[in-house]
Image: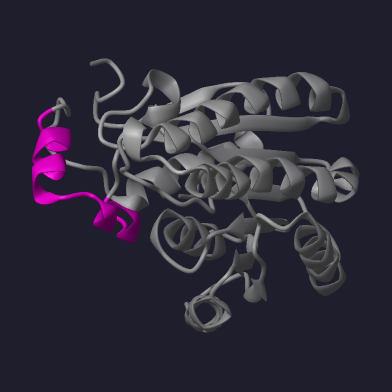
C-alpha cells in the first residue's frame, strides 16, 4: 500500500478486537500508522495489540477498554489515548452491534442500545477527540455505516438501519462543520461482510442476502479495511462528506 501516506500519525479504531476494526487496525499498523485499539473486550483488544506489535515493521498498537455507549467512558478513554500516544489524527468509528428483529419484535431496550452504540457512540467519540483532531495537520474521521443506512436494510432490524442512516447524516453534517479545521469526515458503507456480526443471521437470511450481490458473495473485511486506509491517508485530503460504497453492487439493487 505504498501509494498511501499513513506514517507518523495515530488512529483510534473502535470495535478493533475483531472483524472490520481488527483488519483496519492491522492494515494501518503495517503501513506506518500507530493504532489505539478501543473495545469493550479488553482481553481480546490486548491480544490484538500484542499481535500487531509483533508484525514486522509495525508502527505500534495499544489496547484501551471502553463501552462507547457511555459518554463519560469515551472522554476518559480519549484522554488516555492522547496521553499515551501524544496525539490523535484519525478516528475510525467502527464499533457496532446488529439485530435482525422484525418490526413487531423490536423492543425499546434493543432500539436504545443499538442507537447508543452505533450512532451516539460515534458522535461522542468525535466530539471528545475534536480538540486533538484540530491540532492535527491531517485530521480524519471515518464512520463505518452500512448499505442498510443507504437503503433501509434487508434482513436487519429497523434499529440497526436507523443507526446507520443516522451515521450517514452526521457524516455530511460533520464534514461541513469541521472542514474549516482541515478535518475530513467520510463514511464507509459496507454490504454484509464476513465478520462475527453476521452470526445473527439465519441460513435462509444469508441466502437471501447473497442473492442480492452482483458478485454473489459477501464482502471480506480486508476489502473494507482498504477503503478505510485510503480515507485515512494524506492522499485523501480533498475527499470529504462522501459515502464510500464497498458492497459488491448490493447498493445498486
- Residue 167 drawn above or below residue 169: below
Left or right of 116 in this view: 228: left
Residue 85 visible? The answer is yes
- Residue 119 drawn above or below residue 236: below
Q: Residue at x 65, y 44 (%)?
A: 122
- Residue 75 drawn above or below residue 90: below
The residue closer to the viewer here, 219 or 119, is 119
- Residue 92 drawn above or below residue 152: below
Which x, y percent locates residue 2?
49, 49
Q: Looking at the rendering, in which quadrant would you find the C terminus?
A: top left
Q: Residue at x 33, y 28 (%)?
A: 153
The residue closer to the viewer here, 246 or 54, is 246
Is 204 covered by the magenta stretch? yes
Which x, y percent locates residue 185?
67, 31
The segment highlighted magenta reads 194-211
The residue closer to the viewer here, 167 or 229, is 167
Amino acid at each position: 500500500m505504498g501509494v498511501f501516506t499513513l506514517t507518523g500519525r495515530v488512529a483510534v479504531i473502535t470495535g478493533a478486537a475483531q472483524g472490520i476494526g481488527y483488519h483496519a487496525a492491522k492494515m494501518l499498523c503495517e503501513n506506518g500508522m500507530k493504532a489505539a485499539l478501543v473495545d469493550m473486550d479488553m482481553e481480546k483488544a490486548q491480544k490484538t495489540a500484542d499481535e500487531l506489535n509483533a508484525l514486522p515493521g509495525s508502527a505500534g498498537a495499544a489496547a484501551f477498554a471502553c463501552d462507547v455507549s457511555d459518554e463519560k467512558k469515551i472522554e476518559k478513554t480519549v484522554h488516555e489515548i492522547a496521553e499515551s500516544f501524544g496525539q490523535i489524527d484519525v478516528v475510525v468509528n467502527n464499533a457496532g452491534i446488529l439485530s435482525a428483529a422484525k418490526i413487531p419484535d423490536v423492543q425499546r431496550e434493543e432500539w436504545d442500545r443499538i442507537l447508543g452504540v452505533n450512532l451516539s457512540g460515534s458522535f461522542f467519540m468525535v466530539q471528545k477527540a475534536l480538540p486533538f483532531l484540530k491540532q492535527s495537520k491531517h485530521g480524519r474521521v471515518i464512520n463505518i455505516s452500512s448499505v442498510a443506512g443507504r437503503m433501509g436494510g434487508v434482513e436487519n432490524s429497523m434499529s440497526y438501519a436507523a443507526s446507520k442512516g443516522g451515521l450517514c447524516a452526521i457524516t455530511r453534517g460533520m464534514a461541513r462543520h469541521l472542514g474549516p479545521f482541515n478535518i475530513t469526515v467520510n463514511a464507509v458503507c459496507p454490504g454484509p461482510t464476513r465478520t462475527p456480526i453476521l452470526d445473527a443471521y439465519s441460513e435462509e437470511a444469508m441466502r437471501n442476502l447473497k442473492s442480492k450481490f452482483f458478485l454473489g458473495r459477501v464482502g471480506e473485511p480486508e476489502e473494507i479495511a482498504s477503503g478505510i486506509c485510503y480515507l485515512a491517508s494524506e492522499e485523501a485530503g480533498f475527499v470529504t462528506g462522501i459515502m464510500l460504497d464497498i458492497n459488491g453492487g448490493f447498493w445498486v439493487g
